[in-house]
Image: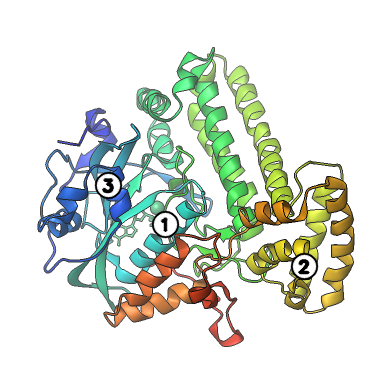
Amino acid sequence: MHFDNSYAQLPPRFYARQAPTPVAAPKLIKLNQALASDLGLEAQLLSPSGVDYLSGNDLLSGSEPLAMAYAGHQFGQFVPQLGDGRAVLLGEVIDRFGVRRDIQLKGAGRTPFSRNGDGRAALGPVLREYIVSEAMAALGIPTTRALAVVTTGEAVQREMALPGAILTRVAASHIRIGTFQYFAARGDQEGVRLLADYVIARHYPAAAGAANPYQALLQGVIGRQAALIARWLLAGFIHGVMNTDNMAVSGETIDYGPCAFLDAYDPGKSFSAIDRQGRYAYGMQPRMAQWNLARFAETLLPLLAVREAEAVAIAQAALGGFSEAFEAAYAAGLNAKLGLSQTQDGDSALAQDLLARMAANGADFTLTFRGLADEVTDSGTVRDLFADPPVFDEWATRWRQRLAEDGGEAASTAGAMRAVNPVYIPRNHRIAEVIAAAERDDFRPFEVLNTVLSRPFEAQPDFARYADAPQPGEIVEQTFCGT
Ligand code: AMP
Ligand code: MG
């Protein structure tokens, strides 16, 4: 049929063959029809058997289910064996654009990598991943996608009993930095090489023709991660668990656990209940990505050069490129957010000055940047987002001078700004509202939120309240991974 499984062709030590465990009473809550159609799976998933395929009670023909092996640094601590403890890779499909994509059931039951876990997922985190990953895609940020949500009719025991659910996730691949670490930590050089060759063929085909393909692979992964983290910062996104097992070598955002978007701008902000030290706080993300990439580079050392000193020099040069690539992408993104079409010395300082003033004044990140477009064409209301409004006025005077030098026509500048500064982001309090309703079996708020977030850059007058920052009583301070 549609499946064309390549990971299952790798040697058996790369995974454990594992079928999903059937569930009691599967119910289809959501099918992402546009994505299903891109994958050529629409007819099967819309058929009466669709819910069985999406719950693991039946297998799509052509799937070869397996749990992938991987390791990872979790909050800085190396764990030599993690692996898919509650996810099953069904296989790969070539989509209608010719792109090979993984189809995975998350919450599909125990696997040889489950350790003490139950292999299951609770409804709340599944809905959060659905909402946030689809919102990221609509924002144009590289990400895994959500194909479907089913409830299982079974309870999962966390701090309390919660309704169980399964997310069907679609990814460019599920290969993580931790996948490389798994083989490297075992001294399995052949495994690292096979994996590297596989990743080059699948994600970095141009590297195959480079003088040193593994150096090109390393540079490629670093470049995509630098661009990705810049996009996160520019959208106010906090991943929450940037462990090396949660960083995909494809350059997609993966593993939406205790993730969150900033309301008020605060570079030190972290929401994750398990991130007590703020290791993965908003402003730490570039540094943490670079740290993770250094772990990736270490796994490749034996492939980079015969002589170790030479390999280390190649790795260090590549890692040194991260900051440069990140800073360039971040600065360009900030300029676009400010409506500046050309770059000048001092632009970064201007943007950073705004951010510092926002942080000191509790200004909402998304509303401030979106509001700047109105300031270009008429007199906006951004100043009201600042605890001390003259702090904004002072900055805005310099920004307007800079805009004048840039020379763009006001209406087109405002239009360009509205194309990069969203109105709608998946705000934490809205997600909390959706989950609370879903736990009462009301999925209408989930539907509405997804619909609004599918067009994040367009003002939707009927849904204006979804743009609002939380009222003081609505603020969500902590998010949970729900594992
Ligand atoms: P995560 O925090 O979701 O990135 O997961 C880290 C590791 O824990 C991965 O190896 C997961 O497969 C595993 N894991 C998380 N939750 C469960 C669960 N409920 N049952 C089994 N394994 C789990
Ligand atoms: Mg993970």
Mark 3–mark 1 distance (CA, rounded to whole Å) = 15 Å
For mark 1, what is the residue?
134
For mark 3, what is the residue?
37
Residue type at mark 3 is Ser
Mark 1–mark 2 distance (CA, rounded to whole Å) = 33 Å
Provide residue 282's location: percent of width, then percent of height. 62, 59
- Name of the residue lying farthest toward the bottom: 473
Q: Mark 2, residues whose alpha carbon is within 10 Å: few (<14), some, or many (≥20)?
A: few
Q: Quadrant of the N terminus?
A: top left
Numbered circles on residues, count: 3
Disc 2 on helix, strand or loop?
loop
Disc 1 on helix, strand or loop?
helix
Q: Identify the mark nearer the N-term, 3 or 1.
A: 3
Residue 12 visible somewhere in the drawing: yes
Report the disc number at residue 116.
none
Report the disc number at residue 378.
2
Q: Residue at x 22, y 41 (%)?
A: 16
Residue type at mark 1 is Glu
